[in-house]
Image (spheres, rainbow, N blue to C red):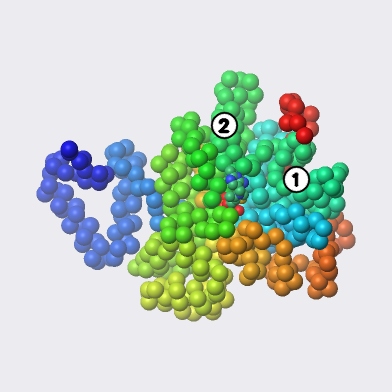
Amino acid sequence: MTVHDQDPYSQGPLDSDPDETGEWQESLQQLVQAKGAGRGREIMLSLLKSSKELRLGVPMVPTTDYVNTIAPENEAPFPGDEELERRYRSWIRWNAAITVHRAQRPGIGVGGHISTYASSASLYEVGFNHFFRGQDHPSGGDQIFFQGHASPGMYARAFLEGRLSEDQLDGFRQEKSQAPHGIPSYPHPRLMPEFWQFPTVSMGLGPINAIYQAMANRYLTNRGIKDVSDGRVWAFLGDGELDEVESRGQLQVAANEGLDNLTFVVNCNLQRLDGPVRGNGKIIQELESFFRGAGWNVIKVIWGREWDDLLARDVDGALLNLMNVTPDGDYQTYKAESGAYVREHFFGRDERARALVEGFTDDQVWNLRRGGHDYRKVYAAFQAATEHKGQPTVILAKTIKGYGLGAHFEGRNATHQMKKMTLEDLKQFRDAMHIPFTDAQARGEPVPAAVLQPRGPGRDGPVHARAPSCAGRVRPRAAHDARGPGPPG
Ligand SMILES: Cc1ncc(C[n+]2csc(CCOP(=O)(O)OP(=O)(O)O)c2C)c(N)n1
Ligand SMILES: [Mg+2]
């Protein structure tokens, strides 16, 4: 049996001018000797890029370095007010966590998820404040598939906007016992026809439905039935969710159809239910090659702005190499430890990388953020996705599950299942979010409802009225939409 050469770059006996090839190879070797591996890599990547433009049919590189796809100098300028938007985001984070926490009080104990929204708040808020268009927009609005168990965050935002009441937040997961104020765990268009547009739990339904929705929108426009060409379909997904058959099964359809009206935003917190998504591998790299192989445009948002300077100073690629070779399991371990631990066990593996953070305190090392928590980096990615033509885009944003919720929650394997915060957690979270909440209030049992009201003395008013560059809020769907009868019971 003949086994064919599996190396895509092998030329075998087909080299038509071995001498000339040898000269090119020698040049590359000399370049690497003179200027280092990093420069050699840059030249190779730029040649591969040119070969694509020249349509030379060279096989694609399935993955790129473990860094942001958008270089700092190419980031779209951020048009908003970062401080103002951060303040609202903190309130939403707080109210989301407290909604679930309160739902665990004695006699209720209905469960819910705290950590998922904590990891994805910036992803959603960039969308709400700068990109999503409501149904009153001339385009007909965007259509958004929200990650099911991030629902407390959507409820908390709606509360701040004055669209949900305190009673409703307190009726989370208690549709029957708290009727008519109960609100469901997950996006449920039948129970909340004014609020949710699409159901997204079970996992995998969001991504596949989003693809078909974007296709249907194309059809409506192309057939002249309704011009929805300016509307965008967004799907917010979990990295564990991407393991579902339904999540990956139709990606090639979206690419073949050239659905540039579709954006996937994957919250890569490296965790699923109670364990790592890929302990010994790298889920972001795997997804990058999978999506790119299927024909998608891929934007990775891995590191926050604090890393830009470190990478700029990393002339021999020592830090880059550590980023590339560290598996997800180790990245998770670092986040469950401390700045000193990160210095020793991440940077410390290469003296050149360690030297880059020499002048940093342990706190500064600890506060080198992941990209999905850097509002500006996320903004730049969303902007690039909306401008990209001819392909659907996936944004792979690296985050921390339980971000901001304190040491018991952040990056811990158990965080998905944790629903109730200890007094210490509450205090840490309050301080991190700058919430006006006294120790006495935190000690209360049950903890008082969210102290933040949509309007009132000292408040700035609803988010959508204040965020300066707000693109229009996502309005509830029309309640009279034609729908068939629901399932019995
Ligand atoms: C088809 C299906 N299987 C299992 C579940 C139960 N489930 C709910 S959340 C979750 C883990 C989700 O992990 P991930 O997608 O990474 O989300 P995140 O980390 O953002 O919470 C699982 C398995 C489900 N909702 N749907
Ligand atoms: Mg996850």
Q: Residues within 10 Å of mark 1 (few under 14, many from 20)?
A: some
**Could you say which quadrant of the image residue 52 lies in?**
top left
Looking at the rendered structure, the secondary structure element under dot 1 is loop
Label 1 sits on residue: 184
Residue occupying image coordinates x 32% and y 57%: 41
The N terminus: image quadrant: top left
Question: Could you tell me if the residues under marks 1 and 2 are in contact, i.e. CB atoms within 8 Å?
Answer: no
Answer with left or right where residue 291 lies relative to residue 476.
left
Residue occupying image coordinates x 49% and y 73%: 342
**Could you say which quadrant of the image residue 96 lies in?**
bottom right
| Image coordinates for residue 455, horizontal then vertical, percent | 85, 55
Looking at the rendered structure, the secondary structure element under dot 2 is helix
In depth, the one of 161 and 467 nearer the eye is 161
Q: How many numbered marks have been drawn onto this rendered protein structure?
A: 2
| Amino acid found under the numbered disc labelled 2 | Tyr
| Image coordinates for residue 427, horizontal then vertical, percent | 73, 72
Residue occupying image coordinates x 51% and y 58%: 276
| Amino acid found under the numbered disc labelled 1 | Pro
